[in-house]
Image (tube, helix red, strand yellow):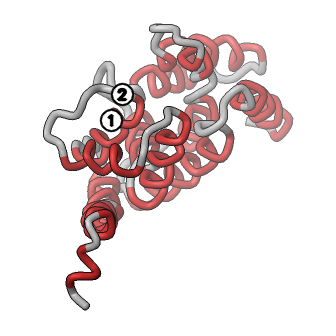
Amino acid sequence: MRSEQWKVLERYAKDNMDKLGLHGWPHVKRVERLSMAISKLEKNNVDHEVLKAATLLHDVAKYIEKGGSSEDHGEAGAEMARKLLRTISFDEEKINLVSHAIRVHTHREKPFSIEAKILHDADFLDKLGAVGLASIFIKACLTDKTIEEVTEMYESENPKPSYVAKHVGWLKNQQFYTKTAKKIGKERNMIVSAFFKALRAEIELGDFSRG
């Protein structure tokens, strides 16, 4: 794809991501870096044009859920991406692959292409580790949840459904399709259990008892 086509694609993605906060453009760029890093370590033949386009456009419809809509942003985003890519004369077969990757990244169906699997895994990795913890507490602030409430959600087997609890569930129940992401996900989440253990200890002054 020519440089001017990428510029149109990026501009479109950024314009739509500006309607968001937490899951805005920085999230997309992190997922792009993760996608490219995974693709280099997997031994499959990856179409990097398809992967990059899908990554940049994967959350273009995320804003519809911000307004309380029950419509899946993956499904809506897949159609938005299809329409945009046709306007810049992107290859039709590649458009189908991009659309599929965007549609399935929200876990509603299993990906069949390596590009879709990598996008799914990269997007999920960005929910874990230190970035995941930071995101959880931003979400807690946005929904008036306390540090204690977040800690209890993590420790509970069945926390009451909420914006924050959904993210906590992602930390506990990882689902990956690539070996690379499984390895990195396990490493990233080592920080999570240690963090919440330390957080609970500080809340209950456990560090004082060691003095």
Secondary structure category for the residue under label 1: helix
Residue 88 in the image: above or below residue 26: above
Looking at the image, which residue is at 44% across and 46% down? 136
Residue 34 in the image: above or below residue 53: below
Residue most toward the left? 157
According to the image, label 1 marks what residue?
165
Looking at the image, which residue is at 22% across and 34% down? 159
Which quadrant of the view contains residue 58?
A: top right
Q: Is residue 43 visible?
A: yes
* Residue 95 coordinates in the image, percent (x, y): 58, 21
According to the image, label 2 marks what residue?
162
Horizontal arrangement in the rendering, residue 36 relative to residue 118 (left or right): right
Task: Decide which of 51, 16 is in the foreground and name it.
Answer: 16
Looking at the image, which residue is at 47% across and 41% down? 140
Q: Is residue 45 visible?
A: no
Looking at the image, which residue is at 52% across and 20% down? 99
Secondary structure category for the residue under label 2: loop
Disc 1/disc 2 C-alpha distance (Å): 5 Å
Amino acid type indicated by mark 1: Ala
* Residue 72 coordinates in the image, percent (x, y): 45, 14
Neighbour tally class for label 1: few under 14, some 14-19, many 20 plus, Cα within 10 Å: many
Task: Decide which of 152, 131 is in the foreground and name it.
Answer: 152
Where the N terminus falls, by quadrant? Answer: top right
Residue most toward the right? 4
Amino acid type indicated by mark 2: Ser
Where the C terminus falls, by quadrant? Answer: bottom left
Mark 1–mark 2 CB contact (< 8 Å)? yes
